[in-house]
Image (cartoon, coloured by chain):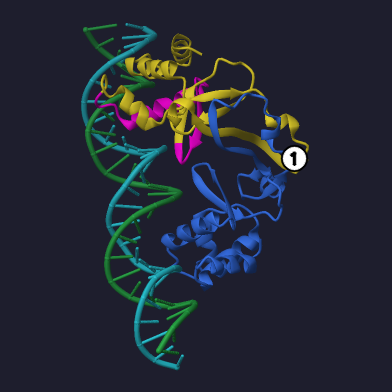
Chain colours: A blue, B yellow, C cyan, D green
Amino acid sequence: MDVLTAMDLLKKKGFKYTDKRRDLLKLFSDEKRYLSAKEVQDALKENYPGLSFDTIYRNLSTFSELDILEETELEGEKKFRFTCPTKEHHHHLICLKCGKTKEINACPMENVTTDLSDFQVTGHKFEIYGVCQVCIN
Amino acid sequence: MDVLTAMDLLKKKGFKYTDKRRDLLKLFSDEKRYLSAKEVQDALKENYPGLSFDTIYRNLSTFSELDILEETELEGEKKFRFTCPTKEHHHHLICLKCGKTKEINACPMENVTTDLSDFQVTGHKFEIYGVCQVCIN
DNA sequence: CCATGCAATAGTAACGATTACGATTTATAT
DNA sequence: ATATAAATCGTAATCGTTACTATTGCATGG
């Protein structure tokens, strides 16, 4: 996933091309880590001083639905990151300070031996949390 | 973990014995599933009509710190359940409708081959989500 | 090109979950 | 019993998120 591909996808789905969307995507493309709505607002406030939360949240959830962004929830806050280029299903080791991630190859679902048939399974979550080298110092 | 053990633990730590705490623990002991603060309030409102959120949240987080309750966050809401009697570290299959759980034996951390040494790992989360038989119907 | 229609946005209010506060009540030790 | 500190109530404040209305701006067709 990159900015141009994402903008093309938006266009194909009937969404409009706006500078805010381009810059929003560029931010995620540059950062490649989990960001909160607040962090997005801060990062873009120089170019868009009046950028409203309505705009931010609406676009983030639109992008998320189109799989342009990945979404998770850390410490009660929604976080978004540019979808990893890795095609295969994977999980993340996440820095709780800055949102930086590292891919975990294995999916734990493959090793589950517990019988799950008495539930209709709809999803799963596996995340490892920590503090990255940069944030430790 | 049971109500009496929990109340003893509270006493030992210098917390006071109150009817509300006993009934709160009894609720979790009876239900053995994840409950939200709202559900706790609803469940106890017959006996304690004026039970305030301050009391509920304060006790829930106290219990959680003492490992009397386990805590997780589902769909933006904190959820608590009585700590499983199972001694070994384990994870849960959780019904998103009613909070009912089933224990998953394996811990995915054992099968992770990715090098984690560039992060200071502080924790992990593995949960499988679904809908239990009762809630499907 | 300009006009038209509808999506996108700003500004702000509303909302739900959680936390915090001052006044009052209650459990416990003496 | 009394003192003391914790626990609670009632309610307000806070935080993150969502929703609303008026306005702006993109894109399509004359």
- Secondary element at tag 1: loop
**Residue under pointer 1:** B116
**B68, above or below A123, in the image:** above
Work out whether residue A14 or residue B86 is closer to the camera in this orientation and state it: A14
Quadrant in the rendering for residue C27: top left
Q: Is residue A47 visible?
A: no
Residue visible at 32% across and 28% down?
Answer: B41
**B107, above or below A96, in the image:** above
Residue interval drawn in magenta:
B49-77
Residue visible at 75% across and 44% down?
Answer: B118
Q: Amino acid at mark 1?
A: Leu
Q: Position of residue A99 (x, y in %)?
A: 62, 49
Q: Quadrant of the N terminus of chain A?
A: bottom right
Q: Is residue B61 magenta?
A: yes
- Left or right: residue B17 versus residue B78 is left
How dense is the environment of label 1, judged by Cα within 10 Å: few (below 14), some, or many (20 and up)?
some
Work out whether residue A12 or residue A128 is closer to the camera in this orientation and state it: A12
